[in-house]
Image (cartoon, helix red, strand yellow):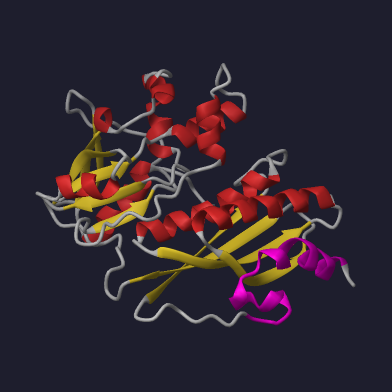
Amino acid sequence: MTQEFSRIETYFAPLAGEAGLGLRDDAAVFAPPPGRELVLTTDQMLEGVHFLSGDDPALIARKLLRRNLSDLAAMGAAPLGYLLTTALPPELPEAWLARFAEGLATDQEIFGIKLFGGDSSSSKHGIALTATLLGSVAPGMALRRNGASAGDGIWVTGTIGDAALGLEARRGHLAGAHQYLVKRSMLPTPRIGLALAGIAAAAIDVSDGLVQDLGHMARGAGLSAVIRADMVPSSPEAAALGEAFLETRLTGGDDYELILAVPPGHGEALKEACGALTVTRIGVFQPGEGVHVLSSAETVLEFKQAGWSHF
């Protein structure tokens, strides 16, 4: 048995669900839930770009799944399962793969998903990982990023900027341990399971930075977005770092919180739907274009970049 097939049988076949057919065939056979529409998303993580070489393989695996789960959450979809593609250096220790598989198993249990299949190959330039998540939603109820109307409030879940600051801490750019921020950077919490249908008009997750992702929503709706920087919620740990890191918080990304367009009068329903999860109104969609970030004195703040660049 080749190294490729040995690794599949040892580490990944135990993770397969019924649709995966034991990972012994060329494709999965999957029956979608009756009366539901499928929602599909894919995301990749590259060593040195999306994770550091010394990161815990279990956390890398869990973040890979959670980045995609966050996309499903932004569409209002429930997760079903996933496909996994790996490109791994031949010399990668078996202990790394064992730990990676442990991470997958942990989040499969948490989020009720199974591995359907995928592909594996060798890499000459570090570790490359891709997950494709499948979810489902009631017909016509998928949230889109382009559904905002003028006057809709701009709301966010959780706190913004922790992950970007955690990455700065991991790179040694912040004094102190900052354990909470580091954890938020390495293990985001996808906002799966929120009953947002009929409450939010549009949604997107914060992957590339609050300002940049909000810009996607504004352009899709043909509107402008106006937010107040001092209204953007921050964790106590992030707030303690002060205004010097405001730009990092608003443009750094990797939070995987949700930005929601919420029509007037729906705020209380949103809070009820989110339960213990904090949601905060930070601005409003208006006629015009662009994203305008205002200070507490109502002056427009300028940033060097709106968010993460993939090129």
Percent position (x, y) of residue 248? Answer: 43, 32
Identify the residue at horizontal 36%, vertical 35% (top origin).
159
- Magenta part of the chain: 3-27
Q: Name which quarter of the figure residue 55 lies in.
A: top right
Q: Quadrant of the N terminus?
A: bottom right
Residue 233 showing in the rendered view:
yes
In the image, residue 203 lies in the stretch drawn in magenta: no
Q: Name which quarter of the figure residue 48 lies in.
A: top right
Label the magenta part by its dominant secondary structure.
Answer: helix
Along the horizontal axis of the image, is 90 left or right of 13? right
The foreground one among 125 and 85 is 85
The foreground one among 190 and 308 is 190
Identify the residue at horizontal 29%, vertical 63% (top origin).
143
Along the horizontal axis of the image, is 226 left or right of 248? left
Percent position (x, y) of residue 210? Answer: 36, 42
Percent position (x, y) of residue 70? Answer: 44, 54
Along the horizontal axis of the image, is 188 left or right of 96? left
Q: Is residue 288 above or below residue 255?
A: below
